[in-house]
Image: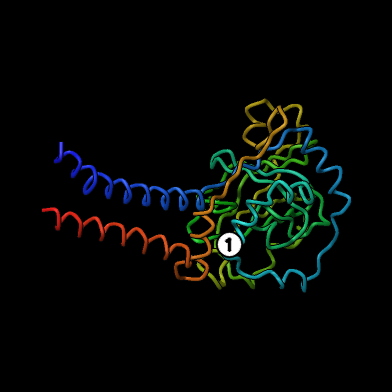
């Protein structure tokens, strides 16, 4: 009986502490890197578009130049506020079914919007007309936002919708460009109708951009899409309530990544766990 108590106290309990702490950190980090749910019902989406489309106005180059590299903490803040952000700036959705990618389309360039969905680089341009340019932040290797467009092949379909009409594009270009190569953002000189997806390529301060461009193939009303196709666009039949997508641990890890050092609370947790294990080890030696 004494041996069992010693095993529990000096072996199983420390192992449980180490396992629980490791699992807590892993879950927080995994949560940080995964794509949050932004699903909306068709009715909710139509209400957003009706309210926000009239607010779509041109943004100056000065406004765009104020956008800087966003840290992981901005990503966490955007997740917390994504329902509010979509309600204030949502005008549609984009989906690349082959990559299981779907995001809200937002009509104002801000740090939070670029960290929430695909943002209209030229909000004054209409979906399904000319060259629709959609941008988002990129967070290193985090599988969020437009990160997966690097895998897109020529011929892949891209869906855009304003919750009334759906435009289906076929990818013709997937390449890396210098940030100074802005010609790809311009309106087409011919009658082509394009979509251009753009994000940073590389680490903080990179001069490179990943660009995917597609040409319009088909237009239809959203009621002609099957339920499965609407689901791929992140549109549900029923009213949705977005789940909480950030935890205390994921926020601490995001802040640590941004500061390039552990936060004080994380250091304190590790110190306390180490002290506990040290005390258990000392007591075990004394008892024996």
Disc 1 marks which residue? Answer: 73
Quarter assignment of residue 237: top right
In the rendered structure, the answer to whether residue 9 lies left or right of residue 287 reads: right
Residue 78 locus on image (x, y percent): 65, 55
Residue 199 locus on image (x, y percent): 60, 60
Seen as rendered, the residue at the extreme left is 288
Say above or below: 61 vs 93. Answer: below
Badge 1 density bin: few <14, some 14–19, many ≥20, Cα 10 Å: many
Quarter assignment of residue 7: top left
Task: Tell me what residue is drawn at x 62 percent, y 35 percent.
Answer: 232
Task: Tell me what residue is drawn at x 66 percent, y 26 percent.
Answer: 227
In the rendered structure, the answer to whether residue 235 lies left or right of residue 178 reads: right
Task: Tell me what residue is drawn at x 14 percent, y 53 percent.
Answer: 287
Question: In terms of depth relative to the viewer, which is nearer, 116 or 138?
Answer: 116
Q: Secondary structure at mark 1?
A: helix
- Which quadrant, please, contains the N terminus? top left
Residue 41 locus on image (x, y percent): 73, 33
């Amino acid at each position: 009986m004494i041996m069992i108590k010693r095993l529990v106290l000096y072996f199983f309990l420390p192992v449980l502490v180490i396992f629980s702490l490791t699992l807590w950190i892993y879950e927080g980090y995994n949560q940080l890197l995964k794509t949050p749910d932004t699903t909306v019902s068709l009715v909710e989406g139509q209400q957003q578009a009706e309210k926000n489309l009239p607010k779509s106005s041109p943004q100056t180059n000065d406004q765009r130049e104020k956008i800087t590299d966003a840290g992981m903490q901005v990503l966490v803040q955007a997740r917390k506020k994504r329902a509010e952000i979509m309600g204030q700036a949502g005008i549609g959705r984009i989906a690349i079914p082959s990559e299981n990618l779907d995001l809200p389309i937002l009509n104002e360039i801000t740090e939070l919007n670029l960290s929430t969905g695909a943002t209209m680089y030229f909000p004054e341009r209409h979906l399904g007309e000319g060259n629709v340019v959609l941008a988002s932040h990129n967070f290193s290797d985090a599988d969020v936002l437009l990160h997966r467009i690097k895998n897109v092949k020529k011929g892949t379909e891209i869906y855009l919708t304003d919750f009334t009409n759906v435009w289906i594009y076929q990818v013709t270009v997937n390449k890396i460009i210098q940030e100074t190569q802005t010609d790809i953002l311009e309106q087409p000189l011919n009658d082509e109708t394009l979509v251009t997806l753009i994000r940073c390529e590389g680490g903080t301060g990179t001069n490179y951009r990943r660009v995917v461009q597609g040409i319009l193939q088909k237009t239809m009303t959203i009621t002609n899409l099957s339920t499965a196709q609407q689901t791929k666009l992140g549109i549900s039949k029923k009213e949705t309530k977005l789940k909480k997508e950030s935890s205390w641990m994921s926020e601490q890890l995001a802040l640590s990544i941004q500061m390039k050092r552990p936060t004080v609370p994380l250091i304190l947790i590790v110190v306390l766990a180490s002290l506990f294990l040290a005390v258990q080890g000392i007591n075990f030696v004394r008892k024996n």
